Image: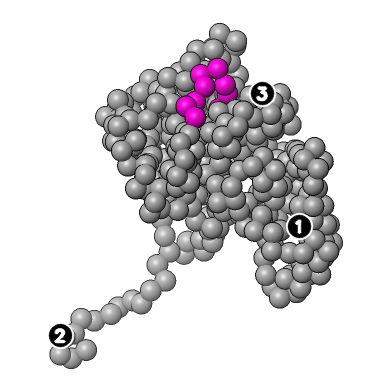
Amino acid sequence: MADKPTKGLADVVAASTALSDIDGKAGRLFYRGYDIHDLAGRTTFEETAHLLQRGSLPTSGQLAAYDEELSQGRALGALVEANIPEIAERGAPMEALRTLVSLAGAESPDKDSNSAEANLRKAARLTAQQPILVARYHAARSGRTVADPDPELSVAANFLLQITGQVPDPRAVEILDACLVLHADHTMNASTFAARVCAATLSDMHSAIVAAIGTLKGPLHGGANEQVMRTLQGIAPDKVASVVREKLANGEKIMGFGHRVYKTEDPRATHLRKMSQELAESGGDDTFFRMSREMEEVVLAEKGLYPNVDFYAATVYHYLGIPTDLFTPVFSVSRMSGWTAHVIEQHADNRLIRPDSEYIGERDQKWKPIDER
């Protein structure tokens, strides 16, 4: 008899990858062998995307060429442009992005090819267009126009410019850029697995990314950072400890804590905590940061759980002026670099992903005519 399957495929190795690795016991994350602590705040998101998609940290010449490719790839096609207003009126953010990426696939110049060269071009365009799609969606639903992306600005700088309508502070750009680096890839998470399953059928990259976005939309994967912010906004600043203890006593989950892989602090949370504190202090109102610290202390004392990447990302994004319901779309802006890299990797050494299942239904049923049932 076969061994009983692991629920949720926990600890099951589903693929080999050279993209990212986690040491859950030590609380370490690596992109292509580079410790996230060495990359965050030192490499730009563009450099990180190049590392994931093209295999190496770029030279200055390679980075200039990649930046130019991203700049050229930001232009949205006519089909996407024509449908943004109606999609923004009818769809929630992740629904809208799922649909807009699908539309972009329909008019991609490389849509009929999964070659290595075509995939690299598609990966760059998807990485370039995702922040534009988020900003254009937000502008359309808000009834305002959005600034055109500036070819001289980075992905992070252009995103803040388009979302807030103001030229961003250089330090704010550096902080968002570091956030994008921290979220770029994370081994075989649910959305990445969905993308690889789709890609393994030799479907195209846009279809695989639509699968990833649809998976990220689920509240057990994406959305935790939004829920963290809504929880903070729903608690009086002087009631944090009592409210959290009451929720825990009632068996309620506090979003932003614990992780299936990390047994200690998520290394990304280490950076995000510092950035949240910096933004809180520079902005002159550290209420949400102080509340977060108190919540962190209570949850650790009561449950032994550490904050994950979502917990302090919430207040960082809030302090940067990003609307709460766009927190998960911002995650997709970053993770696009990792998703596309996984599709490239899957297509390069492919085998159809087809796990087995354990049947637990009835057996030996006998058919009866409908009038005898």
Q: Amino acid at mark 2?
A: Pro
Q: Amino acid at mark 3?
A: Thr
Front: mark 3 or 2: 3
- What is the x, y in percent for residue 37? 74, 31
Q: Which residue is mark 1?
A: 305
Magenta segment range? 147-156
Q: Which residue is mark 2?
A: 369
- What is the x, y in percent for residue 215? 46, 51
Disc on the earlier residue, 1 or 2: 1
**Which image quadrant is residue 172 in?**
top right
Q: Residues within 10 Å of mark 3 (few under 14, many from 20)?
A: some
Query: Which residue is found at the position 76% from the left and 73% from the top?
Result: 246
Residue at the far front in the pictured view: 144
Q: Residues within 10 Å of mark 2 (few under 14, many from 20)?
A: few
Secondary structure character of the magenta stretch overall? loop
**Could you give the CA–CA distance between mark 1 and mark 2, rounded to whole angstroms?**
57 Å
Instruction: Check if mark 3's residue and mark 2's residue have beta carbons within 8 Å.
Output: no
Disc on the earlier residue, 3 or 2: 3
Query: Which residue is found at the position 50% from the left and 12% from the top?
Result: 65
Observer-nearest residue: 10 or 133? 133
The quadrant of the picture occupied by the C terminus is bottom left
Determine which of the numbered discs, if any, sits on residue 43 in the image.
3
Front: mark 1 or 2: 1
Observer-nearest residue: 202 or 292? 292
In magenta segment, residue 79: no
Disc on the earlier residue, 1 or 3: 3
**Could you give the CA–CA distance between mark 1 and mark 3, rounded to whole angstroms?**
30 Å
Residue at the far top in the pictured view: 61
Determine which of the numbered discs, if any, sits on residue 23 in the image.
none
Q: Amino acid at mark 1?
A: Leu
